Image (cartoon, grey):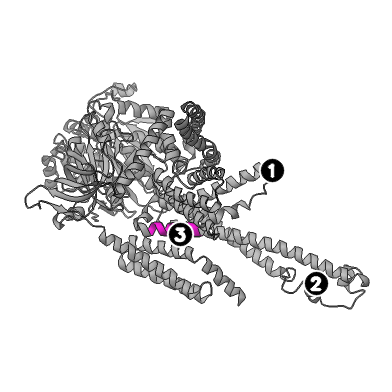
Amino acid sequence: MDAKRKEWNAMERRLLVWFTVCWVLGSAAASSLSGPGTVLAGAGLLAALAAAALLRRSTWPAAAACLAAYGLAAGQRMWADARNVTSLPVQYSAAIQSSPAAAAVYAAELAGVIVSAPEIDGDRVQFRVAGRSISLTGRDAPSSIELGGERMLVQVKLAAETELRIAAGWRRGQQVNVTGELSVPGSSTNFGGFDYRRYLLGQRIHWLLGADGAAAVRASAGSRLSLASQLQHMDAVRAALGRRMDALYPGVQGGYMKGLVLGISEDLDPTMFRQFSQLGLTHILAISGLHVAVFLYVLGGLLRLTRMTRERMLLILIAAVPFYVLLAGASPSVVRSGIMAMLGLAAARMHKLKDGLHLLAAAALLMLLWDPYMLGNVGFQLSFLVTAGLILGAMPVRRLFPGGNPWWKGALFDLLSVTMVAQAVSLPLTLYYFNGLHLLSVAANLVLVPFISFIVMPLGGASLLLDGMWHPAGVLLAEITAIGNELTFGFVFKLSEMKSFRLIWATPALWWVAGYYAALAALFFLLKRRQENRTAAEQGNVLADSNIAAAAAESGSKGSFASALSGTDAPTQPLSGLLRSAVPAGASTPFITLPLAASSRRFGALALVVAIAALAALLIGAYAPDYGDRSAYVDFLDVGQGDSVYIRTPEGRHILIDGGGAVSFGSKESWRQRADPFEVGQKLVVPLLQQRGVHHIDLLVLSHLDSDHIKGLQAVVDAIPVRAILWNGTVKASKDAVSLLRAAVDARIPLYQAAEGLTWTMDSYTSLRSIGTPPGISQAEAAAHIVPDIEEQNGQSVALLITLYNRQFLFTGDADAAEEHAILEQLQAAGEQSEEAAAANQYPIDVMKVSHHGSKSSTSDEWLAYWKPDAAVISVGRSNTYGHPHQTVVSRLQERGAAIYRTDSGGEIQFRIRPSGILEHRERLLEHHD
């Protein structure tokens, strides 16, 4: 009974932790499941809690508290979702549901208060406004709509460089009137793509207001007593410190040090951030617990110099934490650290300091009570899970290593244990959100975390502090810190360039993430239990040995201890009786329980093996989730006004045709350049390929060298290994074309020129054939391997016929009518000599990629009559200025009876060919299935 009561007391001591866990479960269920699904999940939790109580692993009151936490959290999230709606009338708010890709635009004038620090990036200024009212222009539009504080995101495109000074004067807390165009944020148009609308919905923002020029914004002073006005002063302090940091650390070092010391990440070099990200080092750039600890340590040291009492010093430290949290930008990680620090300091002052897990649970509970949408924040998830993992797993893993003599050896093993646990805990979220893992990440963390945390960051903070007191001292310290930064940058660059150590992982399912964490938690628990049992056994052995020796000493007059056991000089007694007499009442008797202990150890060892095997199996399965999938896939990605098609063959080969890209006209003024502009390859194509588990590209096809087809491929070649390139055999004097071809040559990727009759066998069920030779290349040039320079590329497109399970797909880039005619002539000429070539038009092809985005200069009647497509896909940008697709082309396709699919209205279009030959398709925005 005492043992059971002790177990119950242990559970009750952890009640806050379990209460918070159930709160998180309730909030997560309500956010991702329907109402019945949330109730069903709650019923499952009820069954688990009841079982725990019946098995006396918990008390009934504790189980009831945990169930209540689930219900309250689910209710809070449902209540928040019900209130997270726009104040605009139904006829306007309906646009949010009816227009997934791009909503209707309304002329509007918004009045409200700026509630976020304005961010200036090139010629764009962005800030959030708590709206008071909005006026919409149009027939039947209400003159003024009360918004009641609804937040809207305002984006202002500056018209001239002189407007930068005006924009710099906009402050949080000011009242503004903004005239512009109101629109709904776009949602994801590709399967698995970033959903901007969903992202803003988590911040309770439903509308974007775009304004042209600073004149569209009229700002005036706001209430001095509002929270936004008070935070304006903190913005000014951050800005002033940032300017001082820029003066101390010029160039890329300024943005790096501002992020490292002050949490100002806006000026961090994007390339540098990606390199840190590839190595799993972004946590260094995020203000977190280490920064808060250093701040409190330094401030506490200064306060100790004043000889004030401990209680008063703790109060000052508690009051200083919110100031530092706001100064560091109040990201989820620093808020979590700040709350934990304040709770810990308060508990220390009351002499009731609890363990770290309680502080972590309290911090999570407080943050979710304040904002349930915080649960979907990646920083929130990483911060709490990694911290919890370190609390639970760092010590069991550390005890696997030898002791700490000499001291540096212990410090090294401590660091190695913490790094390994942090990497293991963060791995599922890293794979889920970022689809990558660098095998040198642990080594990079081992080297850079102590170097940056204990040398660079303190020196950077000290240089900023000294600069305010004595400028030469601050500059000198900054120069020393800059040397450390250069060493850091060089080390990160070298490791990030080792592309063979970078692994790409498909986005795992949520059940996989849950299973991984369950197996990892079991591993930590088993390691801890194994070490506790070993310690208890060692202590029990020592106790038994000492008591048996004492018993032998007492029987010394009758003979030795050996004779006592043998019974030569004493009456014989059972061995168990002798041992019971040798061990004091209440003490353990390890010798008697040796068989049971050995069995327990064997069971524990087996459980450890099972946990490790489960983790290994999960990782292997996640790396190749489609290993057994023998279907083929053809995905027409939505890249706007451009082309990009990803093909996965039945046996797992990967083909990519083009990579999209925007066409630039003229030069852009330097002041308009943004720090990290949108680039379709880096922001869209590469993430989509990585999410789908594309570890390498077996064949990259460049249909031709126009920027709207190849600009995004530079990022693809940099991020994903490419084994071969097929292109039209020409060059073009453009930056994008020259850069891509040079990158391919530098990477030693074989380049193959498309020509009539060239065939590839990708696997047992996939063949690829080049139909026709691009007209700009003569037979003599092709034979001599001469690469001509051709500026006009549309009529030089590679034409491919790809067969997957006897289903045919035709790709022709931007071929015009002249090239289509030339290809047909070549096919007919080849057909006189080749029965296989002549048979190409004996039955309709299944899917045709319409040339040149549906331009009227392509997709001729002659072309359609030859191929007889069952379906046609038009890759085209929304509201493009070219008028694509032309109605003439659409009419031709309709007359031929071809089903027409368009990326501007359907988003990404996916075709799936099953082993039986059945062809299915779906569209991202329409979710239509055949």
| The magenta stretch spans residue 142 | no
- Magenta residues span 358-368
Rendering coords of residue 911 (x, y %): 28, 50
| The magenta stretch spans residue 363 | yes
Query: Residue shown at 19%/39% (left/top)?
Result: 217
Q: Residue 582, which numbered label?
A: 2
In this view, the residue in front, 830 or 916, is: 916
In this view, the residue in front, 892 or 855, is: 855
Task: Tell me the quarter of the picture where residue 575 sits.
Answer: bottom right
Residue 550 in view here: yes
Lateral position of residue 693 relative to residue 15, left or right? left
Residue type at the position of mark 3: Ala
Lateral position of residue 317 relative to residue 532, left or right? left
Rendering coords of residue 774 (x, y %): 25, 29
Against 755, is 595 above or below? below
Marks 2/1: CA–CA distance: 40 Å
Total marks drawn? 3
Against 33, is 637 above or below? above
In this view, the residue in front, 29 or 461, is: 461
What kind of element bears circle 2? helix
- Neighbour class for label 1 at 10 Å: few (<14), some, many (≥20)? few
Rendering coords of residue 167 (x, y %): 25, 35
Residue designated by label 3 = 362
Query: Residue shown at 68%/63% (left/top)?
Result: 536
Marks 3/1: CA–CA distance: 38 Å
Query: Residue shown at 33%/66% (left/top)?
Result: 75
**Predominant secondary structure in magenta?**
helix
For the residues bearing labels 3 and 1, Cβ distance under 8 angstroms: no
Residue type at the position of mark 1: Pro
